[in-house]
Amino acid sequence: MSRIRREGAVEYRFEHPDDFRAHVRDGKSRKPSDKLRTAGEAVSAFLHDGDYIVYDFSSLTRGPQALIREVIRQGKKDLWIGAEFTLHESALLTGAGCATRIDVGFLGYGNYIGQAVCDGRVKVYEWTNGGLALRILAGARGVPFLPTRDLLGSDNLAVSAAKVIEDPYTGLPVCLVPALNPDVAFIHVHQADPHGNARIFGTNLFALEAAMASHRVIVSAEEIVEPDEFRKDPMRTTIPYFLVDAVVHAPFGAYPGAMPARYEIDLEHVDLLNGIRTEEQMKKYLDEYIYGVADHEEFLDKRVGAARMKELRRRASIVEGYR
Amino acid sequence: MSRTVEFTDTEFMIAQGARLLEDGKSIFVGWGIPQIVAILAQKLYVPNVVQLFEFGAVGPQSVLPFVRGTMGGPQNTYRSLQWLNMNWAFAYSASGYMDYGMLGALQVDPYGNINSTYLGGTFEKPERRFAGSGGGNQVASHCWRTVIIIKHEGRRFVPKVEFITSPGYLTGPGAREKAGLPRDTGPYRVVTSKALFGFDDITKEMTLLSVLRGMKPEDVVKDMAFRPHVAKDVTEIPPPTDDELRLLREEIDPSRIIIRGERMSATA
């Protein structure tokens, strides 16, 4: 007897919780080791064509932009992105031919990506921010789904793979979202040690949940600190090392977005990205800022410049609450 | 002495939205204009309002000027009571702690259903694609009272939205409860750049309550693609006050990127 009252019918990423558990047992080491890698090494080793990626936080705040540029530089294909707040990086990943599916979230609008959706060059599925965050929590919690009292009554239900069933406790309709266990999580943090212990200052979307739920985790960090720092102040640990596969030292890794209390958003560069409408403009941007430089360090040196970085650091004057 | 005040339609929409909030209540703030409304309200009228943002900022008191495009930056998470994450933010709303939710909308229908996803064509092949839900679906589902902020353009008020991104009263009385949404929730007001609407207690349909001073109900209803109910006594809304305009223009958005819009005037 099926209790399903309504369900969406689109493709969705799902893995049996026991299969993910087996991966955690066999594929994730609890032994501390030096995981410092360059962005090129980490992306090449841990991200494969066809993978599902999630990241934390957004395009404009603490997003793993250096890692995303590296993905584009390496020409990864057929990626499926789970994106809560995605403005320009979905456009870049689509324009560069890397991404073919996006679960949202909030999709940057009015520019290149909107047209790409209309043209059918990228498929978008609607889970909503709360739905995606809950899917990742389910993935981290080792359960096949979690219930929620939203999505109900909306058309997002039909274009996700959420299901509505009768709640055995209240008898009311309740919405279920399936667990999400991404292939890879990218998380940009304030501080990390070489083993992968990581600290975020400020709010986040689902940094810990995504790190727990993902097969492979690449942390990029503004600053590399000693492992002992974490044991001195455990309240501040966002992600423990045994969830992490690679640590990339990436100062200004969230550029052109902001890193709270470290540097401000570069609105001029964001406007340049948001202004991309045509294939020609996209190609010009990718050539100049991504393909035309060897790595993140060269990008900062040749395309951003020390003066600009100094100014963006100066503008990050609010430090209260961040440490 | 009466005098004429000049302002933009956006400034009026923000100002009248700010006057709606109640002190000592909580509000789940959506992306964009609702952020500005909440900031103005907290500065002028409701110092003890608790703002909540979906990325986990609980009770922030934003730093000015407002930086466009940011949500999780230090400016609008400043002096929060608590910093959390998204699953906890929606836990606050789902368990009933959020009195108000405030959302922008691309399109709205008589039952207060919101479309923010696409216009024209089909979901798979839209003519124009927009941002979609973000956390709007959760806000409209969970908060006790949802306030919708929308420019008063006729094409935005349609008999039936093309896609329900965030639920209003769906198909009418009882439909939210039947769908499984939390009891006694739903749209409360629609704040536009010309008027204020509520929802009829019985039919749950949008009802014109007030218009900008100097306008007639017919002026605001005529270009809407559906005919809303009109309250027996439509009241007038005063134009933005000097304090509201000064804060908006000098402190919140000195570059006037957000508050720009169509020029309007009314008698102060």
Image: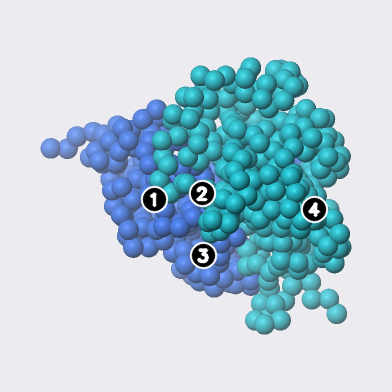
Residue pointed to by mark 1: B79
**Dot 3 amino acid type:** Tyr
Residue at 56% across / 62% down in the picture?
Answer: B88
Q: Circle 3 sits in a helix, a strand or a loop, which is it?
A: helix
Give the position of the N terminus of chain A as an image quadrant.
Answer: bottom right
Question: Color used for chain A?
Answer: cyan
Residue pointed to by mark 3: B92
- The one of B215 and B52 positioned closer to us in this rendering: B52
Residue pointed to by mark 4: A215
- Which comes sooner in the sequence, label 3 or label 1? 1
Residue at 57% across / 19% down in the picture?
Answer: A305
Q: Position of residue A211 (x, y in %)?
A: 70, 53
Q: Position of residue B258 (x, y in %)?
A: 44, 34
| Chain appearing in blue on the rendered image | B
Alpha carbon separation for disc pair 1 and 2: 11 Å
Residue pointed to by mark 2: A202
